[in-house]
Image (spheres, rainbow, N blue to C red):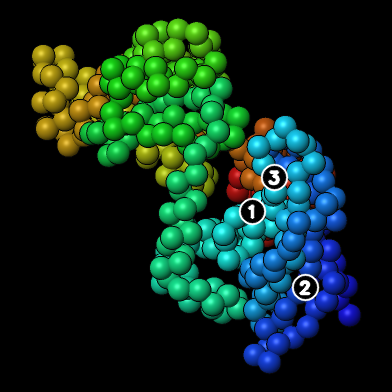
Amino acid sequence: MVSKKHWAPTANVEVGEVRQSETGAWVVSGRLAPNGTCPECGTPSRQRHGWRCRRIEDFPAQGQAVWIELRVCRWRCLNSDCRRRTFSDREAAVATPYARRTSRQAQLLGHVAHAAGGTPAERLLRRLGIRVSDDTILRQLLRAAQVVPPRARIIGIDDWSWRKSQNYGTIIIDLERRAVIDVLEDRDVVTCTDWLRRHPEVEVISRDRCGLYAQAARKGAPQAEQVADRFHIVQNLRMAIEEQMNLHGRATGRALLSDADNISTASNLLKSRLAHRKSREEIYETIRALRQQGLTCSEIGRRTGFPRRSVAKWLQFETPPDRKRAVLKRSSAWYFEEYLKQRWENGIRSGNALLPLIQERGYEVSVRPDRPAAW
């Protein structure tokens, strides 16, 4: 049998009785602590002025609704200097003032409404045993959206696209709560400056290295410390390394088998890579030749069918760029290419013999024995 304490919405509620009504709903009688604390002056009191019964709905049990009849006491304030003479029990963890459902059920309604909407959420909650209308669900969602968030001390500011490559706005995030604070309609210095001036509580601003947000932070929040976003630092480093590697081709990539010596015994995968490399070389030579004729990137793009940005990127290379490949993992036989090549040269040319060797080094994928031989 379920213990009475399991029917309590919070640990502060003492359950006295659990019964089932004629309609099948469960009724839980409970009360709060035997004393109260004045919300005005904080003085504890045990002098009861009166009490009333508050009826609120909780999570369903066994497919039936659960109603909590909570005995709410009214206490006398013992502080003669306090302007409050009496006060009632208040427990926000159980339910907010004037609410007809517990806080945890209201939170569930908000989550379901946010994911499904009004009518779909109503049908889903009805199957879960919570009978509520779609209008109530939407009101709960609107009520949750109107809650004033706490003041943010550490914020992150960055641009984001309403429509990629066409229309950009500004998003501001509270980095301590990891929640979106506001979304600005554009990424203009004046707009960002006005927002920062309305929030003087900001102490730290995390941003990218764009001068737009740096200028807005200096004007709108001179008291705040500006720091570089870790993501943008790593991104700038990656782009710089990638540009340097592209200027000199892909010489540091994985070595493939010799084109001239092993073309007759190369696998279909190798043949496909060789054909792809040859095609990229032809494209590179064509773009270079058109550029030497004095054509612009836009004109080269119209003649070749490539986007202007791709043409401009190819013209930065000194050699034909190779295809970018994913980082190899231990689940791929290509991760052990050098080791397999050494075993192959030593005379071990059977898939049944090569597979256990690489499995000892971390290769855990179960494949056919002939697969490692065609790496």
On the image, the x and y values in percent for residue 195 come to 37, 23
Q: Residue at x 60, y 30 (%)?
A: 176
Q: Tell me: residue 368, above or below residue 354.
A: below
Tag 1–tag 3 contact (CB < 8 Å): no
Q: Is residue 72 visible?
A: yes
In this view, the residue in front, 129 or 87, is 87
On the image, the x and y values in percent for residue 91 come to 70, 52
Residue type for callout 2: Ser
In this view, the residue in front, 117 or 233, is 117
Name the quadrant of the C terminus: top right
Tag 1–tag 2 contact (CB < 8 Å): no
Disc 3 versus disc 2: nearer the observer: 3
Q: On the picture, is 249 further left or further right than 27?
A: left
First in sequence: mark 1 vs mark 2 = 2
Residue type for callout 1: Arg
Disc 1 versus disc 3: nearer the observer: 3
Q: Which mark is residue 29?
A: 2
First in sequence: mark 1 vs mark 3 = 3
Disc 1 versus disc 2: nearer the observer: 2
Q: Which mark is residue 85?
A: 3
Crowding at mark 1 (Cα within 10 Å: few <14, some 14-19, many 20+): some
